[in-house]
Image (tube, rainbow, N blue to C red):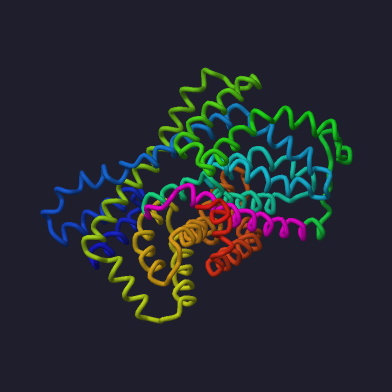
Amino acid sequence: MVIALIAFVVCLLLGMPIPFVLGSTGIAHIINIDPNLLSVVPQRIFAGINSSSLSAIPFFIIAGELMGESGVSNRLLQLVRDLIGWVKGGLGYATLIIAGILSSVLGSPNAVSSILCKTMIPDMKKDGYNEEFTGALIAASGVLAIIPPSSALVIYSVIASTSIQKMYSSAIVPSLIIMVGYGLVVYFYVRKNDIKTIDETGEPYRFDVKKAGKSFVSAIPALLVPTIMVGGSMSGVFTPTEAGAISCVAALLAGLIYRTLDLKKVPQMLGSAAASSAVILFIIAMGNILGYSMAVDKIPQLMSGAILGLTASKEIIILLMLLVLIVVGCLMESTAGIMIFAPVMIPIATAIGMDPIHFGIVFTLMMTVALITPPVGMLLFVTSNVGNIPIGKLFKRILPFALVALAITMSLAYLEDLVMFVPRLMGY
């Protein structure tokens, strides 16, 4: 165990990419346990990604690439703005709604924040939002990537051997609560500042039924993509993989219907999606080496016994796990964090009576919230880079959103019935 920790820290300090950190640490640990076990490493690499559920991830990414490149997301943005743009500060609320819709397609916090930076920042500045608050709102919206189909939920489901459909349905209520919490932050900001509601011509924005109706009709092809992804997979009509594949076709058809998709760029999009998928699957494969070495060394059982031996209080144990997760999430990418710590913490959670689905939502949500928590929050750096906003300003403005997300996540850890309401309602 000590050798593994030393190898892990040294690899991180050397600046090695996370997949190599996981693989190197796992191999060093295996050598320390029994060098003869090295013959099993190739099998564990293959076993890590030999799951049909993981094949959904490339389809999610391809659908997101098609929607982003073809401008389909702009139709959704226009629909949301026409519906609530007349509300004072409406563009802030519209950002949250469009983030939720994009999250249901992309499943990636970084992808959601990148697209919102490109589409929302100019218009929000016109309405009077300053760039640092806009950037903070966009970065915080990346947390909504827990909305199905979330790649993090898929990976956790594979590790914990739980139902992906049940995980998806359990994420609905937490996502809505976080959106409401963020909406309150926007509301108080709008009240305190001179935020306008102006249209493209610079005139005060007014609700127009005909315009909203036209936007809705125009957005129907675009709305099919998230509807298929979320509705199809949650209802059990499609498996998540099938829902992802059908959504790719729907996104492609939407781009062709709108005549905004350049077919010459499709190979480039597929290449980009393949590269993104390869990174995720590589992390999972390398993480499985470390997971195997920890299982052989019985580290999950040892840690479970150590933590459960500290106190008999379920509430304190949950708090300790949450504190560990927020630190881990600040230091490493969420996929790697799930691969390393889910196998360790799931036995602890089940030992204190937490439902694995409930714990999975809290686990993945806390890892995602850590992405906007200073000083390391990776989403802040993505937003700073894409939106050209000084990182120091984002650190200050993100605090209200981070505190709201943290408070909600920590509350949900103790409110199992709230998290499990939808799956129980659906009979899972």
| Left or right placement of residue 110 versus residue 42 in this view | right
Chief secondary structure of the magenta portion: helix
Give 227 or 305, whichever is nearer the viewer: 227
What's the residue at 60%, 41% (across, down)? 102
Residue 110: tell me if it is visible: no
Residue 254 % position (x, y): 61, 25
| Left or right placement of residue 48 versus residue 330 in this view | left
User: Number of numbered discs present?
Assistant: 0
In the displayed structure, would residue 210 be above or below residue 321?
above
Residue 423 % position (x, y): 54, 54
Residue 178 % position (x, y): 63, 57
Task: Determine which quarter of the picture holds residue 98.
Answer: top right
What's the residue at 60%, 59% (across, down)? 395
Give 120 or 149, whichever is nearer the viewer: 149
Task: Determine which quarter of the picture holds residue 348.
Answer: bottom left
Q: Is residue 171 magenta?
A: yes
| Residue with the most extreme front position | 427
| Left or right placement of residue 215 versus residue 65 in this view | right
Residue 171 % position (x, y): 55, 53
Viewport quadrant of the N terminus: bottom left
Q: Is residue 99 magenta?
A: no
Query: In this picture, which residue range is highlighted in magenta?
Result: 160-189
What's the residue at 81%, 34% (across, down)? 200
| Left or right placement of residue 52 versus residue 217 in this view | left
| Residue with the most extreme left position | 36
Residue 339: tell me if it is visible: yes
What's the residue at 53%, 44% (across, down)? 234
